[in-house]
């Protein structure tokens, strides 16, 4: 599984080099299959993938009841500390099939619920163990795993958003208390007004207030242009939804078709002509138990029983937008006009926009209900903040050869594709590796000298002009014996629609052949060719290989070497930039990989055009074939397995009308 770590002595990888023939067959045949449709980019529900977690990892128990500030909110302080201060990723495990308060996974006879956070063993150094111990003194409850286990991971937390808490109403202390409860420092947010929002803010949080178009019109571009996120509470919600541009069509009705009923008569502007009663009606219903926002235990609605607006309902002439997810509903009305206590989703029913989330009540820390209810309501807020951080993070990837011999050097490169440039880079090694220039996007990494097989964790932390930070990590396997091939260089260059690859070896020992593999995301590689080696040689030897169908986008090439005994070593990776102003381009995928029932590939096209996808078995058999159509712009191509594929390794090949080819390996679980 991706990001899983298991080190075995002299670890080597066996390749299925029949895939090379499959790739060639696919290109020559022109016969492709696809189950594919263009989708809007909705991220309301994280797509989980099973990942292997090593023994000795730390599992934070988020399902303890009753929920307290110590066991329910302090874990968010621990997560903030790990990500911001120590570059340690945190896995967020959420079952896709559980019901409300259901089990995410079970380990060592403990059933974990409520959206479980995990710190992997590979990152738990003595200093990190000390930080975990500190947070346990603050009330965090967790256990170290006693064996390897698999969990459904919604996403890996590596970034925190830049948050502004509104001060226009003078109620900023309400939200500041939530952060204090969680143990998150005050430098995690800025205090300000909507007029001060810039492209450098990711979330605007409003605990209370009386929005008007002159004071809050900035929020329109905030979600539609900057794609940033909004959270609001109490009667600021219905008043904000009623804010309308007096000289234009714009209105801040982020989650409804034409606004919400007002909390009081004539309080929400001329666009809102209806009001609702103050107190919500029972029964309360909870939905979307697999969404990140809804990861809390027990009830949260009672925490909203305080303040001037405790629930929300669309105007009778309108409704909730199609993408608005009503997490907690009241007994008033029916869908899509039901009353809600908690609702969230993409602004203006457009998944390309930033999100908005509304919670009823004036203060979730001192509102109604039990202390456990109030903790659950605050957890929903912090869950939303974590999801915003994932959506707004600086997208950074890193690539390097992750199978090295003791003291061996290799190139390491980082690519940043979002955020606000310019960027600064900082490479680090957990176990004694070194970098030629640790502040460059591309540098040379030298593995530590070791006397036994081990691993290193290599990280690159990227900071954009706004101060957003994110990091990417790689697990590097280091052997204590020298490699059979001493590689001097490995290069790849795009020219005339092809990519020309060359490399030079200094010496070779029992080297049977080289394998060239290709990837569009730097993570999932497929073999595209082999070149016979020199066997045993003490003189430098030059090699070449040509990829005749590289595609227009960014592409990675990886060189490996196979001995006469069949064992294989990774040697080096090269990155080739995409052709400027050329599309289509694969932007992500396939995910998840491995998959159970379906996977998707994201592709950007400059025009409407047909495209075909083929799924081949490793023996060259075409397994599935269907065709779909790409729209100009961003597309998500989804393959749904109709129980045609057995568990195993397959090759997907995507071909567009412009004869652009994209390939990859996919595993059916």
Image (cartoon, rainbow, N blue to C red):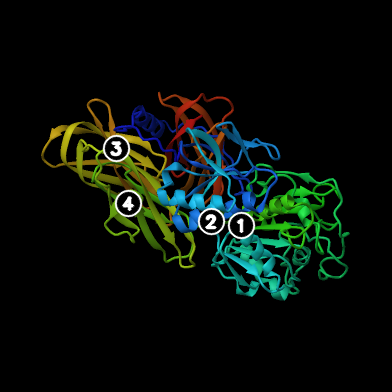
Q: Where residue 615 sits: x, y (%)?
A: 48, 31
Instruction: Indicate whether 246 appears above or below 203.
Output: below
Measured as percent of width and height from the top left, residue 544 is found at 23, 41
- State the residue in front, 55 or 42: 55
Residue furthest left in the image: 539
Which picture quadrant has residue 626? top right
Q: Mark 3–mark 2 contact, CB under 8 Å?
A: no
Whole-percent x and y of residue 574? 31, 47
- Mark 3–mark 4 Cα distance, whole angstroms, equals 21 Å
| Residue topped by disc 1 | 182
Please tell me which residue is depicted at 31% across the width and 32% down the height of the picture: 9
Tell me the tag on residue 453.
3
Earlier-in-chain disc, 4 versus 1: 1
Q: Which residue is the site of mark 4?
A: 412
Residue projecting furthest to the front:
137
Q: Nearer the viewer, mark 4 or mark 2?
A: 2
User: Residue 243 or 133: which is nearer the viewer?
Assistant: 133
Question: Upstream in the sequence, badge 3 or badge 2?
Answer: 2
Image spot of residue 186 (x, y percent): 57, 66
Q: Secondary structure at mark 2?
A: helix
Q: Nearer the viewer, residue 133 or 519?
A: 133
Q: CA distance from mark 4 to mark 1?
A: 37 Å
- CA separation in Å, label 1 and label 3: 40 Å
Mark 3: secondary structure = loop
Q: Which residue is mark 2?
A: 80
Q: Residues under labels 1 and 2: Cα distance?
A: 10 Å
Q: Is residue 581 left or right of residue 637?
A: left
| Neighbours of disc 4 within 10 Å: few (<14), some (14-19), many (20+) | many
Neighbor class of circle 1 (other Cα within 10 Å; few <14, some 14-19, many 20+) is: many
Question: Disc 3 versus disc 2: distance between alpha carbons?
Answer: 33 Å
């Amino acid at each position: 599984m991706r990001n899983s770590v298991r080190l075995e002595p002299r670890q080597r990888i066996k390749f299925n080099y029949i895939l090379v023939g499959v790739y060639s067959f696919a290109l020559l045949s022109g016969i492709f299959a696809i189950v594919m449709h263009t989708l809007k980019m909705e991220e309301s529900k994280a797509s989980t993938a099973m990942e292997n977690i090593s023994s000795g990892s730390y599992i934070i128990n988020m399902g303890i009841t009753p929920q307290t500030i110590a066991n329910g909110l302090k874990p968010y302080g621990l997560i903030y500390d790990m990500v911001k201060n120590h570059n340690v990723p945190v896995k967020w495990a959420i079952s896709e099939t559980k019901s409300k308060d259901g089990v995410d996974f079970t380990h060592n006879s403990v059933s974990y619920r409520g959206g479980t956070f995990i710190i992997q063993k590979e990152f738990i150094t003595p200093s990190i163990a000390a930080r975990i111990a500190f947070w346990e003194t603050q009330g965090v409850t967790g256990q170290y795993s006693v064996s390897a286990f698999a969990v459904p991971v919604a996403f890996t937390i590596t970034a925190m958003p830049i948050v502004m808490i509104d001060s226009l109403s003078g109620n900023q202390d309400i939200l500041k208390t939530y952060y204090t409860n969680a143990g998150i420092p005050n430098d995690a947010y800025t205090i300000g007004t909507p007029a001060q929002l810039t492209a450098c803010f990711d979330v605007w949080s409003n605990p209370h207030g009386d929005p008007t178009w002159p004071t809050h019109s900035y929020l329109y571009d905030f979600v539609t242009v900057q794609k940033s996120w909004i959270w609001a509470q109490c009667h600021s919600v219905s008043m904000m939804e009623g804010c309308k541009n007096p000289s234009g069509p714009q209105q801040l009705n982020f989650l409804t078709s034409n606004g919400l009923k007002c909390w009081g008569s004539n309080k929400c502007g001329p666009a809102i002509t209806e009001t609702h009663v103050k107190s919500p009606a029972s029964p309360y219903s909870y939905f979307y138990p697999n969404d990140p926002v809804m990861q809390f235990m027990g009830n949260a609605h009672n925490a909203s029983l305080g303040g001037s607006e405790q629930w929300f309902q669309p105007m009778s002439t309108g409704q909730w937008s199609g993408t608005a997810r009503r997490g907690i509903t009241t007994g008033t009305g029916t869908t899509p006009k039901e009353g809600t206590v908690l609702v969230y989703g993409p602004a203006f029913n457009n998944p390309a926009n930033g999100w908005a989330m509304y919670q009823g009540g004036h203060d979730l820390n001192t509102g109604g209900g039990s202390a456990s209810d109030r903790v659950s309501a605050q957890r929903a807020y912090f869950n939303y903040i974590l999801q915003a951080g994932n959506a707004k993070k600086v997208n950074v990837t890193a690539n390097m050869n992750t199978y090295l011999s003791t003291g061996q050097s290799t190139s390491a490169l980082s690519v940043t594709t979002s955020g606000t440039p310019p960027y600064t880079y900082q490479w680090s090694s957990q176990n004694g590796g070194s970098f030629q220039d640790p502040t460059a996007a591309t540098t040379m990494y030298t593995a530590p000298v070791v006397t036994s097989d081990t691993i290193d964790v290599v990280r690159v932390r990227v900071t954009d002009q706004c101060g957003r930070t994110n990091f990417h990590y790689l697990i590097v396997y280091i052997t204590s014996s020298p490699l059979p091939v001493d590689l001097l260089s490995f290069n790849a260059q795009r020219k005339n629609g092809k990519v020309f690859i060359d490399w030079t070896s200094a010496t070779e020992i029992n080297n049977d052949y080289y394998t060239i593999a290709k990837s569009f995301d730097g993570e999932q590689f497929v073999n595209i060719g082999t070149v016979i080696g020199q066997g045993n040689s003490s003189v430098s030897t030059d090699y070449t290989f040509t990829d005749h169908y590289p595609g227009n986008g960014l592409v990675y090439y990886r060189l490996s070497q196979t001995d006469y005994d069949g064992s294989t070593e990774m040697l080096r990776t090269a990155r080739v930039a995409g052709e400027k102003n050329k599309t289509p381009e694969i932007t992500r995928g396939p995910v998840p990989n491995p998959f159970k029932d379906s996977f998707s590939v994201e592709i950007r096209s400059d025009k409407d055009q047909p495209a075909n996808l083929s799924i081949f078995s490793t023996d060259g058999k075409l397994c599935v074939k269907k065709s779909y159509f790409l729209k100009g712009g961003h597309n998500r191509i989804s393959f749904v397995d109709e129980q045609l594929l057995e568990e195993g390794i397959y090759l997907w090949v995507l071909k567009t009308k412009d004869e652009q080819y994209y390939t990859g390996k996919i595993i059916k679980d």
